[in-house]
Amino acid sequence: MDEYDIVLIGGGIVGVSAAWMLKRHYPDASILLIEKESVLSKHQTGHNSGVIHAGVYYTPGSLKAELCKQGAAETIKFCRDHNLPYEQCGKLLVATDMVEYNRMNALESRCIQNGIEIERLSETELKRREPNIKGVAALLVPKTSITDYKKITLKIAELFISLGGVIKLGFEVKTLKETSKGIQVRIGTNTISAKYVVVCGGLMADRLAKMMNIDIDFQIVPFRGEYYQLPLRYKQIVRHLIYPIPDPDLPFLGVHLTRMIDGSVIVGPNAVLGWKREGYGNFNVDVKDSLEMIRFPGFWKVVANNVKSGLPEIIDSFFKPGYLKRVRKYCPILTISDLNPYPAGIRAQAVKIDGSLVHDFLFAESERSIHVCNAPSPAATSAIPISKYLCKKVKEKFYL
């Protein structure tokens, strides 16, 4: 039986960053990272738009607000230090009518509270900076950037291995058994012994916590985010990232135009309920995932609470002209033929039993384990500060 001081579960950017940071803090400890897929960054890390968020939207004083702001600076520094691609292109939050203009004012106040640099643009200034974008006003967030999180994850993994860390791919956890002396991690017919375990399970976070009999009051409900890609002739359609002003009553940010680090431009995502936790294809129903979801009382409550906003999302998922209408509100030159297929993403959203969505990062613990339970966007931006937060928790809790 292989034995390690620390085993980390999950090969996304948060898990890999945590492994690297722990190895830096505990160079003499034996540390193993396991991932059930054959490659790292298979899920949320590999299915996002690559935005380095500045921290605009998050409740002042929350972990998201604090760690996102730190993470933006640290991610850019990491890219510079390791010659990885990034571009500080900035983001425009565009108000297209007076209702959104009033929401923009509230968003501006939140930016100020969070210490985020912003600039208010008039309709004339918006048109000067972005000739293809229509709006009555906008907020410019100059420090929003773009990068490639898969490349960042691979570089961090390389650094972890160079320090003596071990990564094993294709190792899916079947059971976790905690005793007073350690945790037995069963992988198929093999068992790994760990003094301590750190779990960064993403879409499987709740299931991994339940394996250890941790009393949790949430379940992961997957939300599918669908994208389209614009034709190559539109590579210069915008200079910035273009976001709508979000409705404060809705949990997601709305369909936006995102410049990618490879020069392409994508549109999206929407947010539709997922019936498969890892459902990236055209047919996305998994019986086990679906049954588990509909048996969870919080699922029915979150559906009831979001019928008004959820139905249009579902309709526009199948009805491309409805999706296009959302984008044309601020970018009227686009036509339906401009929306080309692009891979979807899945947001691992923790939902509490009362139907409320968990908006902040969420953690849980047992005697010998720490679990990252809710880490959707901006977790990629915040990965390095999250890993430092986990190191602090390990130092406080474990004896190494």
Image: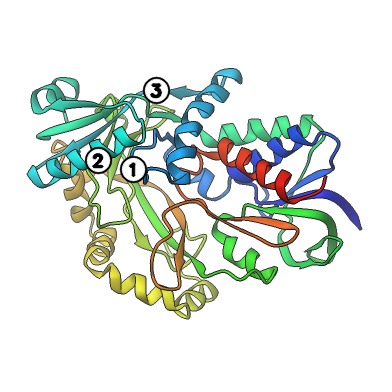
Comparing labels 3 and 1, the label whose residue is closer to the camera: 1
Q: Quick one: label 1 or label 2, which is nearer the N terminus?
A: 1
- State the image coordinates of residue 222 (x, y, percent, origin top left): 45, 62
As measured in the structure, the alpha-carbon distance from the residue carrying label 3 to the one carrying label 1 is: 19 Å
Could you tell me the amino acid type at mark 2? Leu
Q: What element carries label 3?
A: loop
Residue toward you, 167 or 57: 57
Quadrant occupied by the C terminus: top right
In the rendered image, the quadrant that contains the N terminus is: bottom right
Instruction: Report the disc number at residue 320.
Output: none
Disc 1 element: loop
Query: In percent of the image, x 89 and y 54: which residue is there?
Result: 2
Q: Name above or below for residue 386 compared with residue 356.
A: above
- Residue 94 is left or right of residue 382, and the answer is left
Q: How far apart are marks 3 and 2 (CA)?
A: 21 Å
Judge the density around disc 2: few (<14), some (14-19), many (≥20) Cα neighbours within 10 Å. many
Asked if residue 211 shows in the view, the reply is yes
Labels 1 & 2 near each other (Cβ < 8 A):
yes
Q: Identify the residue at the far right of this view.
A: 1
Between circles 3 and 2, the one closer to the viewer is 2
Q: Residue at x 24, y 59 (%)?
A: 316
User: Mark 3 vs mark 1: which is more N-terminal?
Assistant: 1
Q: In the figure, 324 relative to 175: above or below?
A: above
Q: What residue type is labelled 1?
A: Tyr
Instruction: Tell me the number on the disc at residue 107.
Output: 2
Q: Can you identify the residue that label 3 sits on?
A: 88
- Give the amino acid type for the residue marked by disc 3 in the picture: Gln
